[in-house]
Image: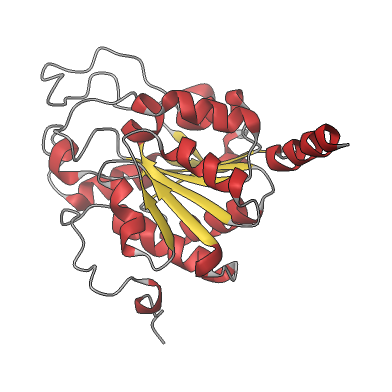
């Protein structure tokens, strides 16, 4: 029997605005499956986003959704979690929204280890706002603002999250749909800041400029260059050149911010 996604979609919101072949729909379906697996109460679940193609995702879901300013998803989500610590808080957004315009908020949400799950759809470009290069656009790749190739080095979102203090960090791709819901489920269940990076495809503003002939080619590229983290130790540096690790990249237990803050309040009231 086919999975029933309709029960999780807000009435009257489809069809979505994503381009044919965009991987964001794959991620949304994975998020829906993960929320069901965790048995989340939609009335007690906040899904927060900023601006951009990926940030349109919460608007389709039947939950407590918040579409905020560009780059401010983590800041708004932090406010929700601090005010309503009993709520499950999930952020959704793209690489530009999360790590460029929202980079400072992203870093400090990780540092605080606040209990939320941030699903970042990394399609290597600013898709909705004009095809500009983002911090995750590969060096040498073309964008509307780098027509001769991007000269900048690339952010590794997952490494950035680990360095900033997130306590659960995982990565997968839109070409691995069953792994998406598995990792998001683990992120939701983790007590602390969970970053789930999904390497995604943007056939319109990235693929066309970078000589991918079709969506299938982009998906094949993602699949061919993904290496499970558990297998990486068996490969040489040369074999890992140009590849990206997938699966759980980092996990540890550390005091969660809301709980610590509650203790501060108790001390102040004593």
Answer with left or right where residue 210 lies relative to residue 36: left
- The image position of residue 60, as x and y in percent, is 31, 63
The answer to whether residue 239 is visible is: no
Extreme residue toward the bottom, this view: 1
Q: Residue at x 18, y 27 (%)?
A: 132
Residue 165 occupies quadrant: top right
Q: Where is the N terminus found, in terms of image quarters?
A: bottom left
Q: Residue at x 67, y 50 (%)?
A: 190
The answer to whether residue 35 is visible is: yes
Residue 167 occupies quadrant: top right
Q: Please, is residue 131 above or below residue 44 in the view?
A: above
- The image position of residue 189, as x and y in percent, is 65, 56
Q: Where is the C terminus found, in terms of image quarters?
A: top right
- The image position of residue 123, as x and y in percent, is 30, 39
Q: Nearer the viewer, residue 72 or 182?
A: 72
Q: Please, is residue 201 above or below residue 178 in the view?
A: above
Q: Residue at x 33, y 71 (%)?
A: 10
């Amino acid at each position: 029997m086919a999975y029933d996604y309709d029960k999780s979609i807000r009435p009257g919101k489809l069809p979505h605005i994503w381009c044919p072949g965009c991987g964001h729909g794959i991620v949304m379906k994975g998020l829906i499956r993960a929320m069901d697996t965790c048995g989340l109460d939609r009335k007690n679940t906040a899904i927060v986003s900023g601006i951009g193609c990926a940030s349109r995702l919460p608007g389709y879901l039947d939950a407590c959704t918040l579409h905020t300013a560009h780059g401010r998803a983590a800041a708004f989500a932090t406010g929700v979690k601090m005010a309503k610590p009993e709520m499950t808080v999930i952020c959704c957004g793209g690489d530009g929204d999360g790590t460029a315009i929202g980079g400072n908020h992203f870093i400090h949400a990780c540092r605080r280890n606040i209990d939320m799950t941030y699903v970042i759809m990394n399609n290597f470009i600013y898709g909705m706002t004009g095809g500009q290069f983002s911090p995750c656009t590969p060096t040498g790749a073309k964008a509307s603002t780098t027509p001769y190739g991007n000269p900048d080095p690339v952010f590794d979102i997952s490494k950035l999250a680990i360095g900033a203090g997130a306590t659960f960090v995982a990565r997968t791709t839109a070409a691995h749909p069953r792994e998406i819901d598995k990792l998001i489920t683990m992120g939701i269940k983790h007590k602390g800041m969970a970053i789930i990076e999904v390497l995604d495809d943007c056939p319109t503003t990235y693929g066309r400029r970078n000589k991918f002939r079709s969506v299938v080619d982009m998906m094949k590229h993602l699949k061919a260059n993904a290496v499970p983290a558990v297998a990486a130790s068996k490969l040489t540096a040369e074999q890992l050149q140009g590849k990206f690790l997938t699966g759980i990249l980092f996990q540890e237990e550390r005091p969660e911010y809301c709980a610590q803050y509650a203790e501060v309040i108790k001390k102040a009231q004593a």
